[in-house]
Image (spheres, rainbow, N blue to C red):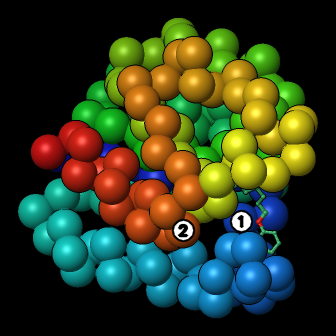
Amino acid sequence: MKILILNGPNLNLLGKREPEIYGSDTFEDYFAKLQFKFKDLELEYFQSNIEGELIGKIQEVGFSYDGIVLNAAAYTHTSIGIGDAIKAVTTPVIEVHISNTHKREEFRHVSYISPVARGVILGFGLQSYDLAIQSFL
Ligand code: CA2
């Protein structure tokens, strides 16, 4: 089973800035733990700060992979383009967030991903990604 973990803008700063909100692990460290835990899965990780690159990656894998775990970060709240890409592909997408966006500013309560995602997992820290992977098993 092939699953892509796709992270959006600024998530490359995980573990380096704002640990009180996002924790102190880098995503690379956490990804290694996921690969160890889910040895039978082919996990791939891609991060970009560029909306078009995220859309390109969704199109690239979206007809062949078994799942996409997507944290579109700030683009969650703005990107009709990412929402349209998810709608256009056949691979199911689970939307994840590290923080509980509903406990935060009102602009984070809106998601262009949720209406086209298979499901949404948020507020469990990095464990949100683990839970999303489990939903494909
Ligand atoms: O809680 C989440 O996972 C978010 O997707 C994170 C986004 C935010 O815009 C969403 O509303 C919720 C922000 C990602 C920024 O990540 C940073 C990590 C470390 C330091 C600074 C930013």
Q: In the image, which is nearer the foreground, mark 2 or mark 1?
A: 2
- Ligand 1 is found in the corner quadrant, namely bottom right
Dot 1 alpha-carbon crowd within 10 angstroms: few under 14, some 14 to 19, many 20 or more: many
Q: Position of residue 125 (x, y in %)?
A: 54, 68
**The one of 101 and 24 positioned closer to us in this rendering:** 101
Picture disc at residue 103: none
**The one of 96 and 36 positioned closer to us in this rendering:** 96
Q: Position of residue 78 (x, y in %)?
A: 85, 29
Q: Quadrant of residue 106?
A: top right
Q: Is mark 2 within 8 Å of ligand 1?
A: no
Residue 22 seen by the camera: yes
Note whether 44 is above or below 60 in the view shown. Answer: below
Q: Amino acid at mark 2?
A: Gly
Q: Is mark 1 within 8 Å of ligand 1?
A: yes
Q: Quadrant of the N terminus?
A: top left
Sequence order check: which comes first, mark 2 or mark 1? 1
Note whether 98 is above or below 137 in the view shown. Answer: below
Q: Is residue 2 left or right of residue 63?
A: left
The residue located at (52%, 80%) in the rendering is 28
Residue 85 seen by the camera: no
Note whether 48 is above or below 82 in the view shown. Answer: below
Picture disc at residue 125: 2
Q: Position of residue 102 (x, y in %)?
A: 71, 43
Q: Which residue is mark 1?
A: 11
CA separation, marks 2 and 1? Answer: 13 Å
Q: Amino acid at mark 1?
A: Leu
Q: Quadrant of the C terminus?
A: top left
